[in-house]
């Protein structure tokens, strides 16, 4: 079994595992349900290196409106179809033992800038989605969490969210986090406010602030940073998503619109991710040692 504690990860710095609710495995190898993948999914999964699966995949789900427009349908039908993709992709993630899946379901900007009728529809859709998929979440051992200024959502939506979170709290498979009324900049504002309050309480100086302190005050303090960020519908933008957390995340953009995105496409993105070389600002494996003397001679000769 392949387990690696987050505290073993040199990127996260000493003591970082304190902020995680539990020691996270590299992947949830005891919850693998590969036999439940479709034949096509299994074929792609067979090409993956299980020891190099991402721990955390984040997705910007985009293109619901265009999907509907291409079919001369109303936008809300695109969102409805998008909710189906959410469930199917989550189930594939749970079958391959992906520990963390974080989906951008509703941004602060969506809340402020979309017509009220669309916002109201998205809120109703979220409630219905949670109600009608809870049993599937349980069957797939999925735990539900949320990030964002969720306290600003309608009370009945918050009730339903709490209900789903509590019902799935003991599940040990994939944690599905929905980013709702979420903005990366407002997350940083919230983190700095709470860090400033802590500094005041503990009579500490701003000069003592570390990256780890900021991490501790983010909505995502309990999870590792995403290894892979997927964006559907071809836009090359981050759209204010997880700005702090994606410092070293690999980005995969697909032209496919979110309502057409399925588990097989998640696996294709992971296969692409596994072909990348992650350097975290260092040198690649085949960059060779730098022979300083040889470099000096070369520079002198040129
Ligand atoms: C972008 O489509 C998507 C969203 C506004 C948010 C994602 C929402 C869903 C997937 C539906 C419901 C989700 C849950 C969890 C129930 P867009 O309208 O921006 O598409 P466009 O750019 O083509 O207009």
Image: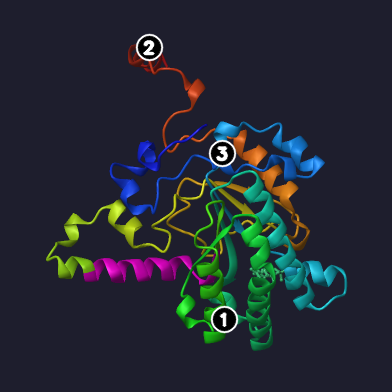
Evaluate whether residue 253 shows in this view. Answer: no
Badge 2: few (under 14), some or many (20 or more) residues near its Cα, within 10 Å?
Answer: few
x and y percentages locating residue 49 in the rendered image: 62, 31
Residue that badge 3 annotates: 29
The range drawn in magenta is 178-197
Task: Pick the residue in front: 58 or 37.
Answer: 37
Marks 3/2 in contact by CB < 8 Å: the verdict is no
Question: Is label 3 within 8 A of ligand 1 (CB to nearest ligand atom)?
Answer: no
Q: In the shown orientation, is residue 50 left or right of residue 80?
A: left
Q: Nearer the viewer, mark 3 or mark 2?
A: 3
Task: Judge whether 25 appears above or below 151 on screen.
Answer: above
x and y percentages locating residue 271 in the rendered image: 66, 38
Q: Work out whether mark 3 precedes mark 2 in sequence or the reverse, and give the earlier one.
A: 3
Q: Work out whether mark 1 precedes mark 3 in sequence or the reverse, and give the earlier one.
A: 3
Residue 184 located within the stretch drawn in magenta: yes
Task: Judge whether 108 appears above or below 176 on screen.
Answer: below
Task: Pick the residue in front: 11 or 233.
Answer: 11
**Quarter of the displayed picture in which ligand 1 can be seen:** bottom right
Instruction: Identify which residue is drawn at 42% across, 67% down.
Output: 187
Q: In the shown orientation, is residue 188 left or right of residue 47?
A: left
Question: Secondary structure under badge 1?
Answer: helix
Q: Residue furthest left?
A: 203
Residue 294: numbered disc? 2
Residue that badge 1 annotates: 157
Q: In the shown orientation, is residue 15 left or right of residue 140?
A: left
Residue 169 located within the stretch drawn in magenta: no
Task: Pick the residue in front: 143 or 197.
Answer: 143
Marks 1/3 in contact by CB < 8 Å: the verdict is no
Residue 12: numbered disc? none
x and y percentages locating residue 4 in the rendered image: 44, 36
Instruction: Identify which residue is drawn at 34% across, 66% down.
Output: 191
């Amino acid at each position: 079994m392949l387990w690696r504690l987050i505290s073993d990860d040199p990127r996260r710095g000493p003591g970082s595992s304190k902020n995680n609710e539990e020691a996270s495995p590299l992947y949830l190898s005891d919850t693998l349900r590969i036999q439940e993948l479709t034949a096509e999914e299994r074929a792609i999964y067979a090409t993956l290196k299980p020891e190099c699966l991402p721990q955390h995949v984040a997705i910007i789900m985009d293109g619901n409106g265009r999907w509907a427009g291409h079919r001369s349908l109303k936008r809300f039908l695109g969102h409805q179809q998008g909710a189906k993709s959410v469930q199917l992709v989550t189930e594939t993630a749970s079958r391959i033992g992906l520990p963390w899946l974080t989906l951008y379901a509703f941004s602060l900007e969506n809340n402020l800038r979309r017509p009220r009728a669309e916002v109201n529809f998205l809120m109703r859709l979220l409630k219905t989605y949670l109600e009608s998929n809870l049993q599937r979440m349980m069957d797939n051992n999925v735990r539900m969490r949320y990030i964002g200024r969720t306290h600003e959502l309608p009370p009945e939506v918050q009730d339903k969210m709490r209900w789903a979170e509590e019902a799935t709290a003991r599940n040990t498979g994939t944690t599905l986090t929905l980013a709702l009324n979420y903005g990366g900049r407002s997350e940083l504002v919230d983190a700095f406010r709470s860090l400033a309050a802590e500094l005041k309480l503990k009579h500490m100086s701003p000069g003592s602030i570390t990256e780890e302190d900021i991490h501790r005050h983010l909505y995502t303090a309990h999870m590792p940073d995403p290894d892979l960020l997927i964006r559907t519908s071809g836009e090359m933008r981050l759209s204010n998503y997880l700005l702090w957390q994606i410092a070293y995340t690999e980005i995969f953009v697909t032209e496919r619109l979110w309502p057409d995105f399925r588990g097989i496409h998640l696996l294709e993105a992971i296969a692409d991710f596994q072909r990348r070389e992650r350097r975290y600002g260092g040198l690649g494996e085949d960059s060779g040692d730098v022979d300083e003397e040889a470099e000096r001679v070369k520079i002198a000769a040129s």
